[in-house]
Amino acid sequence: MIKANDPALHSWIEIAADSEFPIQNLPFGIFSTPDRDPRVGVAIGDYILDMCVLGRQNFFELIDLDPNVFHRPALNDFIALGKPIWRAVRNRVSELLRNDNDEISGNSNLIRECLVKQSEAEMLMPVKVPNYTDFYSSQEHATNVGSMFRDPQHALLPNWKHLPVGYHGRASSIVVSGTGIHRPKGQTKAPDAEAPAFGPTNQLDFELEVAFITGKETALGQSITPYETEDYIFGLVLFNDWSARDIQAWEYMPLGPFLGKSFASSISPWVVTLDALEPFRVKGPEQDPRPLPYLEFLGSRHYDIHLEVLLQPHGGELSSISHSNFKHLYWSMGQQLAHQSSNGCNLQVGDLYASGTISGPDEGSYGSLLELTWRGTQPLQLQDGTERKFLKDFDTVVMRGYGEFDGIRIGFGELKNQVLPTV
Amino acid sequence: MIKANDPALHSWIEIAADSEFPIQNLPFGIFSTPDRDPRVGVAIGDYILDMCVLGRQNFFELIDLDPNVFHRPALNDFIALGKPIWRAVRNRVSELLRNDNDEISGNSNLIRECLVKQSEAEMLMPVKVPNYTDFYSSQEHATNVGSMFRDPQHALLPNWKHLPVGYHGRASSIVVSGTGIHRPKGQTKAPDAEAPAFGPTNQLDFELEVAFITGKETALGQSITPYETEDYIFGLVLFNDWSARDIQAWEYMPLGPFLGKSFASSISPWVVTLDALEPFRVKGPEQDPRPLPYLEFLGSRHYDIHLEVLLQPHGGELSSISHSNFKHLYWSMGQQLAHQSSNGCNLQVGDLYASGTISGPDEGSYGSLLELTWRGTQPLQLQDGTERKFLKDFDTVVMRGYGEFDGIRIGFGELKNQVLPTV
C-alpha cells in the first residue's frame, strides 16, 4: 500500500467525517488569494496547504526538487519531475499533516502562513493543457447515441470493441470550475428546414466525464504499453464536455465533432492523484473480443468512483439528475493512452485525456441530457416543478465524484458552471 | 501598396533572379547555428538576417518593441505584438536591406555578424503551436474522397457548401521540414479480413496543404467576422498532413480522423507574411449557395500560389507528381477562421489552421496519393521507372509553393521530409 493511503492516518487539522479531502487524498491544484499570487496548493479538509510557503521553508529538502516549482501558475513543471517525485512529495505532505507530527502543527505562525481557507481562495486551471483528446469509451453511451442517431440494431459501429474510439479536441477552451459558459452560436439545420440558419444553440447539453492528466512525455515515434501508462498518469479531474447537439448534428459528417464541442469544456480544480485512487481499483467489464496485444491490460485497471450530476435552475434548488460510476467504462485509461501512443504520436506533460460520457446501464445513470431525455422526447422533471429537454440560460450544472473505502471518502470536489446567455 | 512589396526594390545582397526570398518576401523563421542559439531570422536570398543581432544594436529603436523578443526559440512572443508591429518590423528590414541604404551594408563587421548562410543554419519549428485545426476546404478533394469512400452521386455531403468543414488535430506532433517521419503502426482491417490486425501502415500518404498562423488572441465567447480575420493572420506555411489511409479508414467512424493523422504533420520553416502575399490576391470560386452572413467575405480573399509535390525514391531522382494552386480552395482563410470563432472558441497566438488537401480540377493537380492513384488502383510512374501506390520507406516528399508578380517570386522554400521505417 502507498504510505499516504493508510486508512489509519489522522491529521492534526480537524476534518469533517464526510469531507472529500481527508489526509488520504491530498490532491494538487493551483490557487490564488488577494495576498498570494498563483501557486501550487494541496487540499486538506476545508483548507489549502500552500506548497510555496512550505517549499521556501525547506520542508522538501530531502526530495530532489527545486522548491520554486511550487511557485508557478500551473502544475506542469511539478508533474514533469516524474512519478517518484510526485509520490515522495505526497508522502511528505501526509507526514507533515499527521497528528503525530509537529513540524507544522507545533508552530502557530507557520500554521497561519501555510493554511488558507478554501472559501477564501480562488481556484485556477491546474495545468496548461498542450493537447486534449476525448475518448468515447462507455459502451452504454455509444450504444445510446448510435441508437438515437443511426440504427438501434447496429448501434455500436464495427470498430468500437476493437479500439478505444476517440478524437482530438480543442485545448484552448478548457476552463476551470466556476467559469461561466456562454451559450454558443452556430450553424444548424432542422430536419424539415430548407436551408441552415445561424444563431444560439437550442440544444445545449453537458457530458459527464472523467479526464486524466499526463506527467511524462514520449518522443515522436515512441509507443508505450498499457502497463507502462501507469507511470505517465499523474492524476484525474472531473470533466464536463459541454455540447451543442444541434450544431454537432449538422457539422459532424464526415470529420467528427468540432464547433459543437469547442466552445468550452470544464474541469474540476483539484487533481486527484492516481496514487490516491489506488484503493478503488476494480476489474473492468470483460472484453470480448479480446483486445489486440498492444491493448491487452490484465488485472484491476478500472476505478470504482461514484459520479453524480445535479442541475440547479436560476434561483432554484439542486436536482440530482444522474448517478453513474467511472467503473462502467469499457476501455480503461491505460488502454486509451497506449492506443493514443500506438502510432508514435508524442505525449506531453499536461495533456488531458477525457473518458467520453460515462453512462451506466440504467436510465438514471446516463451522463448527458441527450440520453436522459432521449433526445428531448422525455423531458426531465426537476425539483422546482420545471422541465428540461436541454439546458436553459442561468442553469447551473454540478458534477461530483468520489471513491469510498473504510468509511473514508476520496473526492474531487465540485465541478460547477453556470450557463450564461450568448455574448 | 505595402511599402516592402514594391517590385522596384533591390537589395545590396546579391539575390538570384529565381530566388524565392527576394527583398519583397522577408519571411520570418527560427534558426540556430553551432554559434547561435535559437533565435528569430528573416530569409533574404541565400542568407538569414539575424534579427537578434540587429535588435541588440538598436536597429528597431523607432518601433515600440523589446528587442529581446527576437532572442526566443519561437516566434510567438514577436507575433503577439500585433499586426502594426509585424508590418513596421518588415518595413524596417526592407529599408535596411535596400541597395540605397548603408546602415548595414556600409559596415563589413556588422554584415559578417548579422548575415548567416542558410546552408550553415538549422531551421527549427517557427512557432509553438497551442491549437491546430485542419479544414477540408477543397471542393475537388472532398468530391474525390466522397466518391471513393461513399457515393459518387452524392460525393459532397449536404453541409459542405454551407460551412467550412474541419476538425481539431494533434498539435504535439507538428514538426518542421527535415524531420524524419517514422512509418506509423496502427490497427487496420482489410475489407475481407475476419478481424483487425496491428502493424505498420501499408498506405502511408501525404496531403498537400497550406496553413496559416494566428498572431492575435480572442476571449472565450468572442467571435470575429471574416473581414476582421485579416488582422489575426500573421503568415502562412506549407503543410504536409501525413496520413495512414488504412488506419484512418478503420478508425474514423463516427468521430473523425485520429491516429491515422496524429503520428506527424510537417511544416515549412519560413512563415511568409500575409502582407508579402498581398500581390497575389484573387477572387475565389463563386459560392453558391451564398454563405450565411457570418461567413460572407466579399472581395479578393483567395491567393494565387502555385503548389507542387515531388517524390524522391531512396537514392533516386525527384519526380514532380502534382501541380496545384492555393486559389483552388472553395472556402477562404478568413471564412475558416471566422467559422472557428463563431461558437466563441478562443483563438490563441501561434494557432495553426491548415487548409485541407488542395486538389485542383484535373488529375495532375490532386494533392494526395490517395487521389493521384485513385486509392491505389492507378499506380504513379516515377522517373526512375518504379511505381507508387503509397509511400515506401526512405521515400522523400518535397512540397514547394510560390506566387509570382512582375517577374518576382515570393516563395515558401522547401517542405521536405523522408519516410523512415517503423521504430
Image: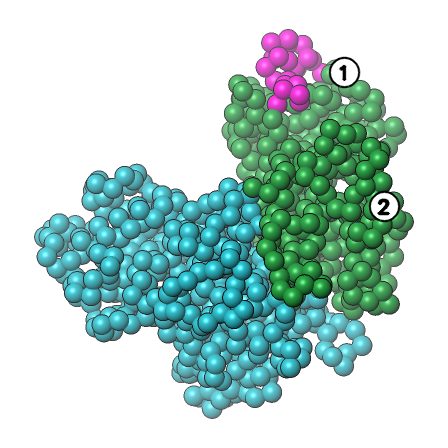
Chain colours: A cyan, B green
Q: Name the subunit of mark 2.
A: B
Q: Which mark is residue B14?
A: 1
Q: Is residue B184 left or right of residue B368?
A: left
> Where is residue B184 shown, x and y percent of the image?
61, 47
> Where is residue B123 shown, x and y percent of the image?
62, 29
**Secondary structure beneath label 1:** loop
Image: magenta residue range: B100-121
* Quadrant of the rendering where the N terminus of chain A is positioned: bottom left
Q: Residue at horizontal 63%, vertical 82%?
A: A152
Q: Name the subunit of mark 1.
A: B
Q: Nearer the viewer, residue A360 or B165?
A: A360
**Secondary structure beneath label 2:** helix
* Quadrant of the rendering where the C terminus of chain A is positioned: bottom right
Q: Decide whether residue A72 is among the magenta residues.
A: no
Q: In this view, does B104 lie above or below B172?
A: above
Ranked by sequence position, the earlier of labels 2 and 1 is: 1
Q: Residue at horizontal 65%, vertical 41%?
A: B266
Q: Distance between the residues labelled 2 and 1?
A: 34 Å
> Where is residue B246 shown, x and y percent of the image?
68, 55
Q: What residue type is labelled 1?
A: Glu
